[in-house]
Every structure is written in structure tokens, then in C-alpha cells.
Image (cartoon, helix red, strand yellow):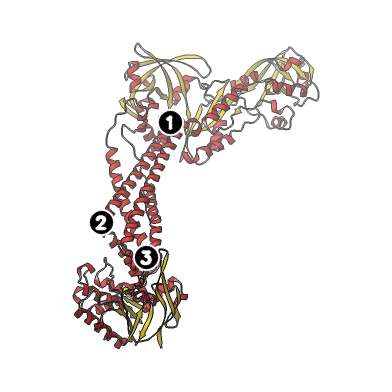
Amino acid sequence: MNIIETTGLVKDYPLGKTTVHAVRGIDLAIAKGDILSIIGPSGSGKTTLLNLIGCIDTPTAGRVKIGDTDVTALDDRRVTDLRLHRIGFIFQTFNLIPVLTALENVEFPMLLMKHHSRAEIRRRAQQLLEDVGLAEYVQHRPAELSGGQRQRVAIARALVTDPDIVLADEPTANLDSVTGASILDAMREMNAKQQTTFIFSTHDANVLKYAKNIVKIKDGLIAREA
Amino acid sequence: MRQIFEISLRNLTRQKRRNILLGAAIACGAAALIMANAYAHGISKVLFERIVRYVNGHVAVSYMRNGNMMNQVFPDAERIEHALAQAGPEVVRSEEAVGVFGRAIGKGVADNIIMVGVDADGDLTDQERRELQSNFTMLEGSFLALNDRSMGIPVLLAQQKAKYLNVGVGDQLRVRFYQVTNQASSATLTVVGIFKPANVFMTSPIFLTTADLRLLAGYRSRDIAGIQVTLRDPQRTAQRVADRLHDALAPGLAVLPASLSLRGRQAPATALGFRSDSASLALVRPRLPLAAGDSTALSYRGAVIAGRLAERLRARPGDTVDLTWPAKHDGATGRKRLVVRGIAAPGAPIADDALLLNERDFYDAYYGTFPAPPAPATARQLPDTGNPLWPALAPEYVLMRRAATTDEYTEVTREMTRASYKGIMVSVQSMYETASAIVQLERALNLITLSAVMVLFFIILVGVVNTLRMTIRERTREIGTVRAIGMQQGDVRAMFILETAMLALIASAAGAVAALLAMAGLSAIPIDAGDNPLGMLLVDGHLYFAPTALAIVGYLALIVAISAATAYFPARRAANLTAAAALRHYE
Ligand SMILES: Nc1ncnc2c1ncn2[C@@H]1O[C@H](COP(=O)(O)OP(=O)(O)OP(=O)(O)O)[C@@H](O)[C@H]1O
Ligand SMILES: [Mg+2]
């Protein structure tokens, strides 16, 4: 069963008088429980594609389906809800909320869901931070953490809602190789345990060995699917 | 919601410098606004509750006879009191305003004065007595000595007046003046107190008790002077009460039930007056055919009597008749000697016992000894509005049309004076006509406050919009993050609005505290205004602020609301970005 399907996905960016065709018609079917890596040269459209799949950007043409839901047909409120409940993001630049502590950052998406008790949320966030090895840093603000620590907080935050899909745009680009590997290990474990679908883009050949499938894109089109 | 609140609160502490600056601006604005309002309110309280109330009354009833405004007397207190009872629940108090112009002779100097009556021992509540006494800061003697007649007629003088007339407490002051009957008169007063005037309006009058002054001025016991009405919430109710009082004072027909005698014969008669201006005469002449007497009968002073009445008395034109009638009060009897000028023909539209008098004679008699009301049988026969003579018949008095402004009031007065009524002209005025200068001053002050609101509004507008724009630009990626994670647009918007509203609330509350402290400080400083008329805006030589809790809360709410409304648009723009666009934001 495919958890994500895209058909004829196109994304154009207007740029002055011209138009940049960042994604030019991508059909993609991703099975539940996959670990998919999207690779391709810089400027090939990886980030754009992930944004479309993650429903944080709207395609110029084509559709995105998450499970049975055609996302392109939904209004902003529903799409936002869908992101909250089914998708987790790990950003290249971590993007933690600077005024919240590590623990509060992790709690944040669960609080938005509004159907868990405070105690339950706290327990789960604490547990996740322990899982990523940050038990001692729960009260630190992002500014008081290292890059790797921040990325681990970001991972805990992406996983706290128990999403079906986790999207990561070059999750290891800002990390040293050891930290990067440990993070990818954590992802793999999670995938094995909970059938969470992981999709990440990368430049890094080391990262590729964690992938079950690889999609290579070039100039906004799929070059080869392995 | 709690989470949004917490994030907003923490975000507030993030840009400390910027938020402190903006907060300080808002605080200054709030303080200025609250102070301006409290000052304007203080002044309006001083103006309306102290000055207008004592100088003009919030609503006033006054009289004028033969164009003479000094003639503040009406012969039937009951009539006026009856109308006052219908003026409505807004009336706190109504009292007679007696003022008599004259000349005072002190030690070696004379000066023009106005004697003003104060009700020092009347049925005042404690509160009213305190307010009254607060207008008289005694330097020498005592206010309550006004009630002590053991040393003659007591009088209070302002400091400046006493100095000019060169008199002190215990000294005598000789005054010369005209009574309401236009009789020249004089009296000796004893100075029992010297006070520091609370405002410029109190420097020149000299104060006697109303009772003493009534006697001096020649008021009879049932005469009533002009009335000053004090209202609750005068700014809102003055016009309404004046209108109501005006309606209650609508005059009826003046009737003088009397008995007429000629050479030992006597018959009951009902005397009515008719207006003697040419328009009225032109109306009366064709409608009142005469059996005897000539066509000039109506123009001359004297009487035209009904045919039946003439028969009973065997009166002919040229006869001198005596009119007598019982007074309404005191069991007195009124008398008037008249010459019969004409006898009405049968069929004239008047009752069989009627006697028509030229208004000049009529009012002299009518006001001179105010008559008892007609017996019911007589009352039923009186002419009504259907009578052809009605428009020319003399009313109890002439009620002046209500005017909306001082100018209009002057115009109405001029019109009425030109019509040269012989009856008393009664007018009802609210402070909007009598004290229009003060009302305008109050309006100007409110306008200043309003301008302060506008200025503040723009400070907040510009400050908040700019700060928010900067803040939002800096936090665009953050917005993208929370939107990607799954925060709804509305919540993102709420986060920024809440942040701004909290800043505005904290800042304006601080401003309110600062304003209260500043007002306490400023009103503690004594100010000597000397003879500057603006000194009347001071209370006991101090600035007077009257902050109200409602106004402060209202302004805080207004500031918070303005800030929140201002924050709405940039916040909405930020929330409407797609998460991807926000995340891409780079600077
Ligand atoms: N907002 C934008 N406006 C105009 N052009 C854009 C915009 N965002 C991306 N592009 C263009 O779209 C193309 C695809 O960009 P995208 O960010 O998806 O590439 P990428 O594969 O993620 O590259 P990288 O590996 O360097 O991150 C690029 O040519 C880029 O210049
Ligand atoms: Mg990219």
C-alpha cells in the first residue's frame, strides 16, 4: 500500500519576468515503511519536492495523495491538521523555537494536537529526549545546545506525534559524520519498530546506505528510480 | 491557548530594548491621556458643580417685566413651585436666586456691589452644606455667623472687596439699592466674615442670607424670586429638564374674580385683560360690538363691561366704578378704581359678568394683589381657545420660547421686548444658554483630550506597526517552522496579537500608575494665579484632577484594543504565507 502518491507534480517559481521550473512533472509512489532517499545535484529540485510531499507548499500542477487523501483538494486548515497528525519534519537548519526549552520544543506539536493530558505529553517528550541521548539537556534553550544536539531535539520533535511520515531535508548536512550516523541509526530503528516512512534528501553518499530505496532527480525530473 | 500565551510572553522578553522603547512610548501616551482626561474632567466638575451651579444654576427660571431684568419677582410662588415639582427626578435642588444691585459705602469709599442671597440655614443636606462652605474659605469671622441677627443684618465679603471698602469684621456697611417695586431703599449691614474667593465669580458679590435679602428687596411672603435648579449629571440632563419645566409653566388665562360697585350697588364681576397693541386691538374691535361708548373705548385705559353687568349697576360710559377682589394669600383685599369706557352690545362674545381691562390696568391689579382662583361656576364660563377674542386676551404671564443658544436667547428676548407685553415674561434657560461660554470652554477641553487620543492613536499605530513589521520579518522562519509542524494560521496570528496586546497592557498600566503619581504630585503644588481669570480653573490654588476609575479602565482598554487592532494586519500577513515560503525566508 502506498502512503504517498504524486502524479504529474509541477512547481514553477516566478522569478522576475521569467519562470523557474523547479519540479517538472514527477510521478512517485512511496510505500508505507519505506526509507526513501532523494538524491540529485544542487538545484535539481529536492527541497521543492519534499516541500510538496510534506504539504507545506502548493504545486503549480499535479496532485499529492497522502494515504487516501488528495491533499491538493484540501483547505489550509485541513492541510495544517494533516501535517500536525501525520507528518514530521526535520529541517536542515533544525528550526527550533528559540524561546522554548528543548523539552518544550518537543512538547509543542503534541500540545497543538490538544488531545493528550499535560502529564502524558511531558512523559512522552522526556522519553524521546532520553532516546536521542539528551536526558540532561531538557531544560536548555536551543542557543545553549550544539548543532548535533539541536538536530536531535528536532528529531524528537518530529517523532513526538507518532507521524506516519517523516521528511528530512539534508538532515546530516550540518553535522559531523559520527553524529550524522547516530541520527540515521535512530531513524532506522524507528522505521523497524513502527513502520514509519522516512524520506530524506541528501548529497552525502554515506547516508545512502541507510536507504531502502533511492530516487535520483535531475532538473526537476526523476532520472532514475532504484 | 495557554501555550500561545506562554510563547507570546517569552517572545516579549526577547527584544528587550525594542519592546521597552515601544512600551515607554505607550506608557507616556497612556499617562498623558489619563492626565488630560482627569484634568478636563476636573475642570468640568469645577465648572458645572461649583461655578455654573452657584452662578447660573444648571437650569434657571427668570422673570422680566416691562423690559426690566432686575425685576426678578413673580407674585405667586405656588405657581412656580408647582411647575418645579414636575421638572423631574434629575433635580437635586432648586432654590431662589436673589440678587440686588446697589452701592455700598464703607469707610470713606463707596463701590458698586451686588448683594447675593445664600441659603445658610435652609434645608441643606450635610453634603450641600459642605460644598457651600467650601466656596467660602473664611479668613476672618465665620460663615455660619450669617444666621446670627443679634448684631443687625449680617453680610460676608470677599477679601478684596473688604479691603477696597476698608471694612473688617464687626464694621458696618451702608448699602443703597432699589427694591423690586422700584422703590429706592437703604440698609445698614454688619460685616460678620471675610472670605477668600474660590473663583473670580465670588470676588465682587457681597453675601446675605436669602431671607434677609428678600426682606430688604421688598419681596412679599408669597412672591418668589428667580429660581436656580441644581441637577444630577447636568451635561446630560439640563436641556431635558429645562424643556420639561417650560412645558409645566405653560400659562393659562389670567382671571380676576371680583366684585364691581357703583353708587352703593354691587355685582359680582370677572375681570379679564386684553392686549392693547395695534394688532390685538384690530382683532378685538370688530368682534366686540359696543352698545355705548365710542370706538376709542378700547384704546383708553379703563374698562369695557358686559351689557348685563352694566344693567345691574346702571352704569354708563364715564362712570367711575370700584373693583374689589379677595387675594389668594393673607386674606387681603385688592382694590382698583376704573372708569367705564364702553358697554358691550348684546351678543358680544363675553360672559354676562365680564369686565375687560386694558392689559396695563389689568396686570397692575392682577400682580398687585394676586387674586384667589375663580369659583368653579365662574371657571366654566371663561372664554376658551374657541372664543374669537382669545388671541387678544391676557395670559397669566408670557412664557418665553426656549432658545438653544445664547444668541438665540438674546434674539428671543429682543423680540419679546419689542412686543412690549405688560405681563411678566417668564423664561426657562438651561446652562447651555446662560453659561454658554463655560459650556464652550468645557467642550474645548474635551476636544483637547480627544486630540490627545488621536495623537496617541498615531504613536501607537506607527510604533506598533513598525515594531511588529521588524519582529515578524525576523521571525518569518520561525513562523514557517510552527506552520510546518501544524500550527493553524489563526493561532499564529493570535500569537503576535497577544504579544502586542500584552505589551500594550503592561505599558499602559505602568502609564496609569505614573499618571496617578504625577497627578498627586502636581496637585500638591500651590499655584498663585493672581488676578488671572484662568485662576478659576484652580481649586484652592491647586490644579484639580478628577480621574475616574471608569475612564482609566476605559483608556487602558482602548489602548490595548488599538494595539491589538494595529497588530492584526502584519500578523495576518505573516500567518498567510505558505510554510515553505516562510521557511525559505532569508536575511
Ligand atoms: N523561491 C524561489 N524562487 C525562484 N526560484 C527558486 C525558488 N526556490 C527554488 N528555486 C529554484 O528552483 C530550483 C530547485 O531548487 P531546490 O531548492 O528544490 O533545489 P535543491 O535540489 O534542494 O538544491 P540543493 O541541493 O542546493 O538544496 C533551483 O534552480 C532554485 O534556483
Ligand atoms: Mg535543497
Query: Is residue B299 something that shows in the picture?
Result: yes
Chain of the residue where label 1 is placed in the rendered structure: B
Q: Which residue is mark 1?
A: B54
In this view, B115 is above or below B569: above
Q: Is residue B59 left or right of residue B418?
A: left
Quadrant location of ligand 2?
Answer: bottom left
Q: Earlier in the sequence, mark 1 or mark 3?
A: 1
**Circle 3 crowding by C-alpha within 10 Å: few under 14, some 14–19, many from 20:** many
Label 3 marks a residue whose chain is B
Nearer to us in this view, B403 or A6: A6
> How many residues crowd around disc 1 within 10 Å: few (fewer than 14), some, or many (20 or more)?
many
Task: Pick whichever of labels 2 and 3 is earlier in the sequence.
Answer: 2
Under mark 3, the amino acid is Val
Depth-wise, is mark 1 or mark 3 nearer the camera? 3
Q: Which residue is mark 3?
A: B492
Q: Residue at x 26, y 66 (%)?
A: A98
Where disc 2 sits, the SS reads helix
Work out which quarter of the rendered image holds the C terminus of chain A and state it: bottom left
Amino acid type of the residue that numbered disc 1 sits on in the rendered structure: Tyr
For disc 2, the marked residue is B16
Rendered location of residue A152, percent (x, y): 24, 76
Is residue A109 placed above or below B148 in the rendered structure?
below
Q: Nearer the viewer, residue A38 or A162?
A: A38
Q: Which type of secondary structure does the marked residue at label 3 adopt?
A: helix
The image shows residue B585, relative to residue B92, as above or below, that is below
The chain ID associated with circle 2 is: B
Q: Residue at x 53, y 22 (%)?
A: B69
Q: Earlier in the sequence, mark 1 or mark 2?
A: 2
Whole-percent x and y of residue B63? 54, 26
